[in-house]
């Protein structure tokens, strides 16, 4: 029987690549993000392989999160896999110069948004006594870097929430996997630098960065592991990367 996955942040980057690899594996998809036109495009492309549906909402808006996921038909509510991927960094600078709107966007999106989605989906998994939650953290959640304290804090929170979820949910047959990528070439840096393409490109200069497909491969591995196996935590760095801020550039 085919499985159903709900993926947040499926319009781009890691979430989109995960949707594509899940579709290749025959997993039906609930594709979530704010940009409906992108959701439609991805849904159209993948609907030749699996069943797809889309939900457009901002994870920071708890009313929309509950309303949109609650609006799924009973068939679609039989979710097997939740990928909590939606998130971004906003800005890179010292705390005393920090933009509080950027802080709100990161804490509200990366942390509270993940919690809002999980609060609605966990009861659906509990009802069925099985499921798998994959939380996308970051190497930034394990290693703090200067000028990124708030983003790093938001991802450290994801690491702790993953642990808490695993402690609460394993007894109910629900697995929790925390995935911590290093430098992945997506829209991430463009968003962090507010559309400044030249600044964003520099992040990936002089080395071969991770591609979103590399992270999708690891997520698929985790959700395909046999019942006796829990992949608790995966850290994936670029080949030229040895720590969050240590990258060997040519
Ligand atoms: P992208 O910017 O390419 O993708 C981010 C996704 O999140 C988009 O689909 C976006 O969709 C969605 N999103 C962002 N904010 C919200 C929101 N408030 N409500 C709903 N959806 C939202 O970046 P990545 O693919 O790189 O990022 C995915 C995850 O991976 C993030 O959690 C990021 O922190 C993490 N990560 C990224 C790394 C990297 O180097 N790229 C490394 C480690 C972790 P839309 O705009 O349509 O809403
Ligand atoms: C994204 C990776 O190191 O740029 O989470 O913060 S990093």
Image: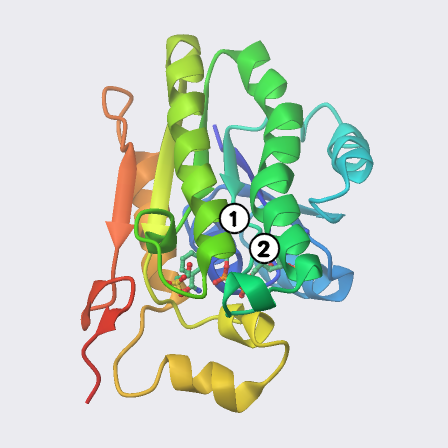
Residue at left offset 26%, top offset 55%: 236
Q: Is residue 234 left or right of residue 43?
A: left
Residue 140 horizontal/vertical position (percent): 37, 54
Q: Is residue 78 left or right of residue 237?
A: right
Query: Do the residues bearing badges 2 and 1 touch, measured as CB atoms within 8 Å?
Result: yes
Question: Mark 1 Cα within 10 Å, few/some/many (few <14, many 20+)?
Answer: many
Ligand 1, image quadrant it occupies: bottom right
Q: Could you give the CA–CA distance between mark 2 and mark 1, rounded to whole angstroms?
A: 8 Å
Mark 2 or mark 1: which comes first in sequence?
A: 2
Secondary structure at numbered mark 1: loop
Between residues 94 and 128, which one lies in front from this camera angle? 94
Q: Is mark 2 within 8 Å of ligand 1?
A: yes
**Image quarter for residue 241?**
bottom left
Residue at left offset 56%, top offset 64%: 96
Q: Which residue is mark 2?
A: 10
Q: Is mark 1 within 8 Å of ligand 1?
A: yes
Residue at left offset 48%, top offset 70%: 186
Q: Which residue is mark 1?
A: 85
Residue at left offset 76%, top offset 31%: 66
Q: Is residue 246 left or right of residue 79?
A: left
Asked if one can make out residue 249 in the rendered structure from this viewpoint, the answer is yes
Asked if one can make out residue 90 in the rendered structure from this viewpoint, the answer is no
Between residues 178 and 107, which one lies in front from this camera angle? 107
Q: Is residue 144 above or below residue 211?
A: above
Coloring scheme of the render?
A: rainbow
Frontmost of labels 2 and 1 is 1
**Image quarter for residue 74?**
top right
């Amino acid at each position: 029987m085919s499985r159903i996955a709900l993926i947040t942040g499926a319009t781009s980057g890691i979430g989109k690549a995960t949707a594509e690899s899940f579709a290749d594996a025959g997993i039906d998809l609930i594709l979530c993000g704010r940009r409906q036109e992108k959701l439609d495009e991805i849904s159209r492309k993948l609907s030749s392989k699996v069943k797809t549906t889309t939900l457009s909402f901002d994870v920071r808006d708890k009313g929309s999160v509950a309303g949109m996921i609650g609006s799924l038909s009973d068939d679609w509510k039989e979710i097997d896999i939740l990928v909590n991927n939606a998130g971004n960094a906003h800005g890179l600078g010292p705390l005393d110069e920090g933009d509080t709107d950027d802080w709100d966007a990161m804490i509200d999106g990366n942390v509270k948004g993940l919690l809002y989605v999980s609060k609605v989906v966990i009861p659906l998994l509990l009802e069925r006594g099985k499921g798998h939650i994959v939380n996308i953290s970051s190497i930034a959640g394990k290693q703090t870097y200067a000028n990124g304290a708030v983003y790093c804090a938001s991802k450290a929170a994801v690491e702790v929430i993953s642990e808490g979820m695993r402690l609460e949910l394993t007894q109910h047959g629900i697995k929790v996997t925390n995935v911590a990528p290093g430098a992945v070439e997506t829209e991430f840096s463009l968003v962090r630098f507010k559309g400044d393409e030249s600044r964003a490109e520099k992040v990936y200069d002089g080395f071969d960065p991770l591609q979103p497909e590399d992270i999708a491969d690891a997520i698929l591995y985790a959700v395909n592991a046999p019942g006796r196996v829990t992949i608790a935590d995966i850290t994936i760095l670029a080949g030229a990367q040895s720590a969050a801020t240590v990258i060997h550039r040519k």
